[in-house]
Image: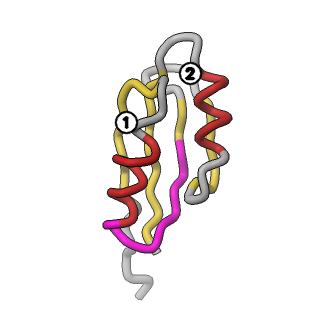
């Protein structure tokens, strides 16, 4: 399982529409709206890095209103 957080900038006046589209995507587990440099924080869970690539490039970044994205992939540290 790959968990990542994508920070998205949304074009002005399209925040609500983009939020509604993104929250309904199957791999999206949570969407948070924010003030500042980024407009949305999107938690994504997929099975592989290839699936993450597909999701970000072919499902998320093609949404009309998304201006740019930055994706942070969570790290798995050993517990012992």
Circles 2 and 1, Cβ within 8 Å, touching? The answer is: no
Element class at badge 1: strand
Task: Tell me the residue at 44%/57% (across/down).
Answer: 4
Q: Is residue 58 left or right of residue 43?
A: left
**Residue sitting at 52 percent across and 63 percent down?**
45
Give whichever of 80, 33 is nearer the camera: 33
- Comparing 71 with 19, the one in front is 19
Q: Quadrant of residue 32?
A: top right
As for residue 21 lying within the magenta part, the answer is: no
Q: Quadrant of the C terminus?
A: bottom left
Q: Is residue 7 above or below residue 47?
A: above
Tell me if mark 2 has few (under 14), some (14-19) or many (20+) residues whose alpha carbon lies within 10 angstroms of its own: few
The secondary element bearing badge 2 is classed as loop
- Give the label, 2 or 1, closer to the camera: 1
Q: Position of residue 40 (x, y in %)?
A: 54, 33
- Cα separation, mark 2 vs mark 1, equals 15 Å
Residue depicted at x 39% and y 65%: 51
Q: Is residue 47 magenta?
A: yes
- Image disc number at residue 69: 1
Horizontally, residue 66 falls left or right of residue 54, namely right
Mark 1 or mark 2, which is nearer the start of the sequence? 2
Position of residue 79 relative to residue 68, above or below, is below
Quadrant in which residue 6 is drawn: top left
What's the mark number on residue 35?
2
**x and y percentages locating residue 62 in the rendered image:** 41, 36
Residue range highlighted in magenta:
42-50
Instruction: Determine whether 58 is above or below 4 in the image.
Output: above
For residue 28, the mark is: none
């Amino acid at each position: 399982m790959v968990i990542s957080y994508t920070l998205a900038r949304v074009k002005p006046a399209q925040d609500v529409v983009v939020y509604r589209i993104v929250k309904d995507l199957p791999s999206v587990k949570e969407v948070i709206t924010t003030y500042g440099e980024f407009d949305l924080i999107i938690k994504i869970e997929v099975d592989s890095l290839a699936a993450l690539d597909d999701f970000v490039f072919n499902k998320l970044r093609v949404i009309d209103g998304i201006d740019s994205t930055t994706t942070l992939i969570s790290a798995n540290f050993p517990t012992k």
